[in-house]
Amino acid sequence: SQKIEQNSEALNIQEGKTATLTCNYTNYSPAYLQWYRQDPGRGPVFLLLIRENEKEKRKERLKVTFDTTLKQSLFHITASQPADSATYLCALLYNQGGKLIFGQGTELSVKP
Amino acid sequence: DADVTQTPRNRITKTGKRIMLECSQTKGHDRMYWYRQDPGLGLRLIYYSFDVKDINKGEISDGYSVSRQAQAKFSLSLESAIPNQTALYFCATSERTSSRSTDTQYFGPGTRLTVL
């Protein structure tokens, strides 16, 4: 079965630095890869989507890359701020079945 | 979040009790989902419905049942609650726009369920 792995350890960085989160998957590549943000006690919120034929996507301070050879997506937050502190989830969508498969998430903490 | 609402937000119950969690949406989406979230395990799909007459089991459906009463309403039932069903439950919706739908999901605020 398909497996998704995100860094299980929390990522702690200093304000202003770039945060980089990793999402690795096994077996075949998805049609789409999505990133969500989740704050404690709240539902995930969609941030960005990247398609299998795209290498990179940007939105304001966010950047997502997708390497189907490495079976990996990287999620970058530049000029990080304490307000960026949250758990970030990656999710994969395969054409078959049309259901998202979520990783377990990586907690990011940005210190002032 | 206001477009997808869940009731109750918190519930404490005892083993063996029947529990229903409700989800309503005003987004006009066809697709609705129920997930549970446990620490370290991420979101796991319980049931999903692509329209009112289409209901499917997800990864962890045992011990749960669902009802899609209308396009806007999707409820999750625990017929006889047990302690390992203690978790945070989320409802989500997505829009079916075409065969190439990206299935971006919109989540409710969650229901924290504790089974004693």
Image: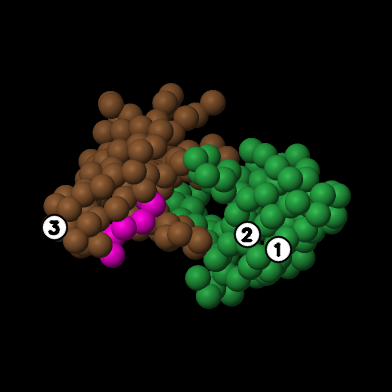
Report if the CB atoms under discs 2 and 1 are less than 8 Å apart.
yes
Q: Which one is earlier in the sequence, the residue at label 2 or at label 1?
A: 1
Tag 2 residue:
B112
Q: Is residue B50 above or below residue A72?
A: below
Q: Residue at x 29, y 44 (%)?
A: A11
Residue B25 drawn in magenta: no
Which is more toward the observer, A6 or A64? A6
Q: Is residue A55 left or right of residue B77?
A: left
What separation in Å lies between label 1 and label 3 (alpha carbons)? 40 Å
Question: Chain B is shown in which shade?
Answer: green
Three-letter amino acid code at disc 1?
Arg
Q: Quadrant of residue B76?
A: bottom right
Tell me which chain the residue with mark 2 is part of.
B
Judge whether B83 appears above or below B24 on screen: above
Residue that numbered label 3 is attached to: A16
* Image coords of residue B55 (percent x, y): 72, 50
Disc 1 + disc 3, Cβ < 8 Å: no
Q: Is residue A41 left or right of residue A56?
A: right
- Tag 2: residue type? Arg
Circle 3 packing at 10 Å, graded few (<14), some (14-19), many (20+), is some
Secondary element under disc 3, as helix, strand or loop, is loop
Residue under pointer 1: B11
Element type at marker 1? strand
Q: x%, y% of residue A15? A: 17, 58
Residue numbers of the magenta segment: A83-88
Q: Colour of chain A?
A: brown
Disc 2 secondary structure class: strand
Query: Same chain for the residues at labels 1 and 3, yes or no?
Result: no
